[in-house]
């Protein structure tokens, strides 16, 4: 149980285009989802927290107009990287936590490797 | 001081060895704790939750020391397949319970 599906797993796009990444909880309802970014050999960096039906909370330094997050249902959150630039190339990972709140572990999607050329 | 700290390693150990990692946290109100493993270029996968009384899952033992604010992970009889980065995750209390990750400890098990 507790499967999180992330799509696409890999995307290559041209500079200036937008990319949408989907994160779905397949067998549980995810009231809270988190989006992370990870550069090579570095730790996970939290970008934003999204709660179903409300606006995402962005971490300091993360541009909310560039990284659009929508969590419209209890099973789906999307991250759109708008006007992508080569420096946005990274590994983006979503995670979901179930309704048990703080005692629930995070369940991760398999990540999206974004390359902007 | 970082909220969650781990020794990045790498810990280089032979097969069959016992190895232990610690993870310290600064927020005394932290409420739940987990260990994840992350393989190169993959997403983190839950290894085990950490309970107040300590818990064991096969070769893996996790412990929590609230007084000293650290959690530990012990791996017995290391296998080559245990080579990975081990991340500790701490959930703080209050509000959104944002999980905080350590930077991870790299383990390399060699023949």
Image (cartoon, coloured by chain):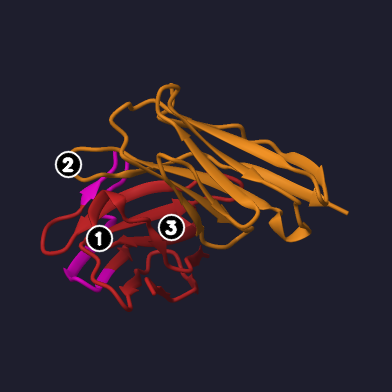
Query: Which mark is on residue B51?
Result: none
Query: Which mark is on residue A85?
Result: 3
Task: Give the colour in which the image draws chain A.
Answer: red
Q: State which quadrant residue B95 falls in.
A: top left
Q: Residues within 10 Å of mark 2 (few under 14, many from 20)?
A: few
N-terminal-most mark, 1 or 3:
1
Q: How many numbered tags mark residues here?
A: 3
Residue located beneath label 2 in the image: B95
Q: Position of residue A32 (x, y in %)?
A: 24, 58
Which span of residues is magenta-colored? A57-77
Q: Residue at x 71, y 39 (%)?
A: B10
- Secondary structure beneath dot 3 equals loop
Q: Please state which of residues B11 and B47 is positioned toward the viewer in this rendering.
A: B47
Residue A11 vertical position relative to residue B52 in the rendered view, above or below: below
Q: Please state which of residues B49 and A95 is positioned toward the viewer in this rendering.
A: B49
Q: Position of residue A92 (x, y in %)?
A: 44, 60
Q: Residue at x 29, y 44 (%)?
A: B98
- Secondary structure beneath dot 1 equals strand
Q: Which label sits in the foreground, 3 or 2? A: 2
A72 is within the stretch colored magenta? yes
Q: Residues within 10 Å of mark 1 (few under 14, many from 20)?
A: some
Residue located beneath label 1 in the image: A68
Q: Please state which of residues B104 and A114 is positioned toward the viewer in this rendering.
A: B104
């Amino acid at each position: 149980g507790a499967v999180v599906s992330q799509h696409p797993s890999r995307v290559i796009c041209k500079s200036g285009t937008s990319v949408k990444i989907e994160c779905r909880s397949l067998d549980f309802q995810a009231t809270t989802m988190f989006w992370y970014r990870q550069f090579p050999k570095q730790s996970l960096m939290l970008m934003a927290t999204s709660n179903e039906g409300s606006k995402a909370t962005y971490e300091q330094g993360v541009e909310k107009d560039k990284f659009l997050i929508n969590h419209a249902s209890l099973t789906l959150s999307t991250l759109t990287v708008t006007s992508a630039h080569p420096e946005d190339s990274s590994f983006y990972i979503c995670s979901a936590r179930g309704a048990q709140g703080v005692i629930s572990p995070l369940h991760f999607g398999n990540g999206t490797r974004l390359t902007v050329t | 001081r970082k909220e969650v700290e781990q020794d990045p390693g790498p810990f280089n150990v032979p097969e069959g060895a016992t190895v232990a990692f610690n993870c310290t946290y600064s927020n005394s109100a932290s409420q739940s704790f987990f260990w994840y493993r992350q393989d190169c270029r993959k997403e983190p996968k839950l290894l085990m939750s950490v309970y107040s009384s300590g818990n064991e899952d096969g070769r893996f033992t996790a412990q929590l020391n609230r007084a000293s604010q650290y959690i530990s992970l012990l791996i017995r009889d290391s296998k080559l397949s245990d080579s990975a980065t081990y991340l500790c995750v701490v959930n703080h209390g209050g509000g959104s319970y944002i999980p905080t990750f350590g930077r991870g400890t790299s383990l390399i098990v060699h023949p």
